[in-house]
Amino acid sequence: MAAKTCLLIDPMHESILPLLSSVSLHAEDVSRESIQHIREKVKQKNVVGIFVRTRTRVDEHLLGTHPTIQFVARAGAGLDNLDLPFLEKHNIKVVHASEGNRDAVGEYTIGALLSLMRNIPKADAEVRQKIWQREENRGMELAGKTVGIIGYGNMGKAFAKRLTGFDCKVIAYDKYKKSYSDQLVEEVQLATLKERTEILSLHIPLTDETRNLIDFQFIADMPQLKIIVNTARGEILSLVTIVKSFQHKKIIGAVLDVLPNEKLNTLSEAESALFQQLTDNRQVVFTPHIAGWTFESHVKINEVLVKKLRNIFTSF
């Protein structure tokens, strides 16, 4: 009898191999194979599941009209590259690992926010050019500010936890959660969050509901807002909205770990013009989608996924 196999469609940390072996699964790395090859492999009866990151779209095109796999394991938090209705229709379980990189995201969000508020990237670039400007790099303190979090799942809570030592007020809005106020955060309605927030941090998944959720009107309705931090998905907050918010002095800074189009060499002329305006702005801190990207989270994600598979399936 052929061993039960799962396909590693996107590159995975090597720790996945012994972890899968511990639940009697054989892993086959097909991350360098063509989509056509993968489509043929996934139809084999001994293949019970697949592992993906963000690179691969999991839908009928990949799995076929009558898929036989039992699960899709998403090595990360977001599910926007999975056709969830299609998977549900065919009784394919979905597991993801937001617990695996929540610490990384929480730490990154603190670090990037402080870097922006204290002008660290700008000051570092100047000193490397032998420019020594103290007054021009006078920064802001996080203490005393009101930080608003939209989305209070694993990522939002991890960020709130790391704010506890900064003497700031932390409020959060989550449309799908209730009664979560505690020593870390005050649960508020969206209108209250808009009214009080000075620093806004986004920790929501990309869905049809959240795409372009943070538009210019949303920001214009926030009279205290100074800074936006986006570690969620770029499509939630467009480049047009960010540029317009700076132009109208609705914000004075932004941290962008994600962008609507992260393939920068494919930007349209209009996208390039907006992107250039932001790269020229020293009050914007960019990073290449690395908030959850640490050596530790690489391993933790695998551990979380395999633990969830063990809890769902008693055997394959």
Image (cartoon, grey):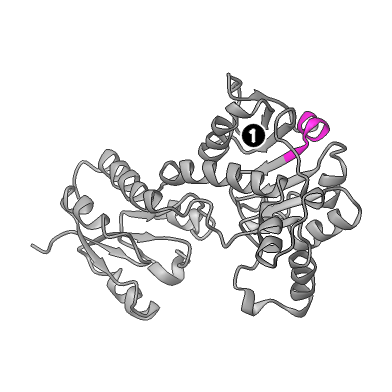
Tell me the residue that label 1 is attached to. Answer: 174
Quarter of the figure with the N terminus = bottom left
Question: Dividing the picture into quarters, in which one does residue 127 lie?
Answer: bottom right
Report the front residue among 136 and 209: 136
**Residue at (29% x, 45% y) in the render:** 309
Q: Please say if 50 is above or below 229.
A: below
Q: Please say if 128 is above or below 302.
A: below
Task: Tell me residue 233's x, y (percent).
Answer: 61, 55
Report the front residue among 240 and 189: 240
Residue sitting farthest toward the left: 1
Q: Secondary structure at mark 1?
A: loop
Report the front residue among 32 and 312: 32
Task: Tell me residue 50's x, y (percent).
Answer: 33, 60
**Residue at (29% x, 42% y) in the render:** 307
From the viewer's perspective, tell me whether residue 175 is left or right of residue 196. left
Task: Tell me residue 137's x, y (percent).
Answer: 77, 50
**Residue at (88% x, 37% y) in the render:** 223
10 Å crowding of disc 1: few (<14), some (14-19), many (20+):
some
- Prevalent SS, magenta region: helix
Report the front residue among 125 and 220: 125
Span highlighted in magenta in the image: 192-199
Name the amino acid, label 1: Asp
Whether residue 91 is visible, yes or no, is no
206 in the magenta segment: no
Number of marks in the rendered image = 1
